[in-house]
Image (tube, coloured by chain):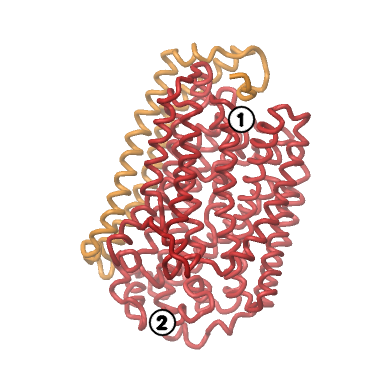
Amino acid sequence: MTDTENGRPDGQGPEPDWEAVQASPEFQELRRRLRVFVFPMTAFFLGWYLLYVLVADYAHDFMAIPLFGNINIGIVFGLLQFVSTFIITGLYVRYAGRRLDPIADKIRHQVEEGAK
Amino acid sequence: MSATLHSAQGLEAINPVLNFSIFGAFVLITLVIVFRASRNTKTAADYYAAGRSFSGPQNGMAIAGDYLSAASFLGIVGAIALNGYDGFLYSIGFLVAWLVALLLVAELMRNTAKFTMGDVLAFRMRQRPIRAAAAISTLAVSFFYLLAQMAGGGALVNLLLGIRSEAGQNAIIAAVGVVMILYVLIGGMKGTTWVQIIKAGLLIAGAGAMTVWVLAIYGFDFSGVLADAVAQEGGKGEALLAPGAQYGMNEISKLNFLSLGIALVLGTAGLPHVLMRFYTVPTAKDARRSVVWAIALIGLFYLFTLVLGYGAGALVGPEQINDAPGGVNSAAPLLALALGGPLLLGFIAAVAFATILAVVAGLTITASASFAHDVYASVIKKGKVENQNSEVRVARITALVIGAVSVLGGILAKEQNVAFLVALAFAVAASANLPTILYTLFWKRFNTQGALWSIYGGLIVTITLIVFSPAVSGSETAMFKNADFAWFPLANPGLVSIPLAFFLGWLGTMLSKESNDKKQAEMEVRSLTGAGAEKAAEH
């Protein structure tokens, strides 16, 4: 590990003790909150998308069942993928703004102040 | 009701002079803006990352501009017009993919890196081997994507400018290449970003206006559009409304579709030119905001293409689309002609060209940054570059070389089947890049050997499977129609190559004892909190 030129925050002051920050309960809480949201959500939307792809791929007749006029289950199912994408985006923005940003900002200030 | 619209106007109504003038005006205006934007381009952060000075919404527009290529506009509208529902499946994969970028990648990358994908991947690893691998993968993805864009450009020239002669088409491709190089050399990332913002605005506005127009003709009843599309002679009738018209023939083609769907959804967040856009904003929160804007704009645009595709099927009809010089790609321009006459066609044609220009410029700056920053500065100069100006000079020279190569490639690949090039770019991005990015951001144990195995493994497996697939030999639509050395049945390798790359990354990691807890701690804290992240440049 001799050739690491990367990673110093713009050369001001001593290097923060990253391992201590990482071990702090505050950081552990931030890490937990991030993972507890993004991992299940990723599993959900990938599963939901995969379900759509499989149904579109293997159940043509089901997708062709008309619902309103010429609009069939396939088109509605496809549009639901748009809807779910928009909703998940909105949920994440709200969650991040309320549950992640405040802790992240606080830790960042502590680290950057401490380093000066 | 539609019969009055698409009466006698065929492609002979195309007015090359008009199309040229509208496109010329676009080039002129954007060049002026690029010149103005370039006055502040001095440092490496300016050239690669536009001084990190763009706002979230601006960058979101630029992401949409980078992402919505001519292939997604002309290709998806045409696919829906002729094959119906199966064309729609593409847009869904392209859109849902952004959730991977939003939830797992964008903010963490913005917080940890400076300019390139290599910055993130090499953060806690041995620098030189990882940067070399990241650069090779970046160059490979960019090259396949570039070639597809340029080759598509040739078809567009034929269709929209009425230029049939070989030499004429080559001259136009070369001219497109020269303008693109000017954008990149003069404007750097800032100029390129402005070109993408303007192009995205024009493209989305144009598609939106056409969508409203089509719907207005049918009294805002989408079901009526579908009814007319189904009723058209020479088309696929009822089959248009359900999936399967394109991919439903047999078990192999169904599996192929599944493979494509997986590569699309996992590839986007591994495309280097998309990743690089996250560095042009000042903070991780702005990176988040840019993805939100990108999702809104891209989603809206794909909803438009759904209406436009069926609208082209209903108002233009499959026979006329198939007879036009560009075949499936001519559906959107023909619909513009049917709706608004030669003027709207000229506008849409100019937007399609602008699209190629902007996407190619974005790819070129990404590839040149990766070469200069990862290969020249870190691998060749071992991180001891005298000053950053020499790194930017190398980036500019690289951009020139890449521009020349893409013009040449575009001319050679003009008549080729280009769809597989785009599929290849997504498959490489999903196999070589995404597993490595996710492991490095979320898995503590991950190390240099694991990263090398997932990058090179993903890259080699993907390219090998493509070479021996029916996309390259042994089928009607193959690159080499007269040879047959295909043994891998799927045209898209994602189904095999992506899980394999994840597995190789895991295996390589477990077989190596290397670990660097200090760097891992630094990377994790920085990626989640933004401590010590690169700040916006002050001008």
For numbered disc 1, what is the local secondary structure?
helix
Residue B308 appears at what percent x and percent y?
Answer: 44, 68
Of the chain colours in the picture, the one used for chain A is orange
Foreground mark, 2 or 1, reads 1
| Subunit of label 2 | B
The answer as to whether the residues below labels 2 and 1 share one chain is yes
Chain letter of mark 1 equals: B
Chain with colour red in the figure = B
Q: How many residues crowd mark 2 within 10 Å: few (<14), some (14–19), many (20+)?
A: some
- The amino acid type found where label 1 is placed reads Arg
Q: Is residue A87 left or right of residue A54?
A: right
- State the CA–CA distance, disc 2 to disc 1: 62 Å
Q: Quadrant of the image for the C terminus of chain B? A: top right
Q: Name the residue under label 1.
A: B128
Whether residue B352 is visible to the viewer of this picture, yes or no, is no
**Which label number is shown at residue B2?**
2
Where residue B377 appears, as percent x and y from the top left, is: 69, 33
Image position, residue B193 (x, y; %): 64, 48
Q: B211 or B284, which is in the foreground?
A: B284
Is residue B529 visible in this depiction of the protein? yes
Q: Quadrant of the rendered structure where residue A28 is?
A: top left
- Which mark sits nearer the N-terminus, 2 or 1? 2
- Residue at 55% from the left image edge and 82% from the top image edge: B11
Q: In this view, does B187 lie to the left or right of B250?
A: right
A100 vs B489: above or below: above
Label 1 neighbourhood size at 10 Å, few (<14), some (14-19), many (20+)? many
Contact between labelled residues 1 and 2, with CB atoms less than 8 Å apart: no
Q: Which of B18 and B432 is in front in this view?
A: B432
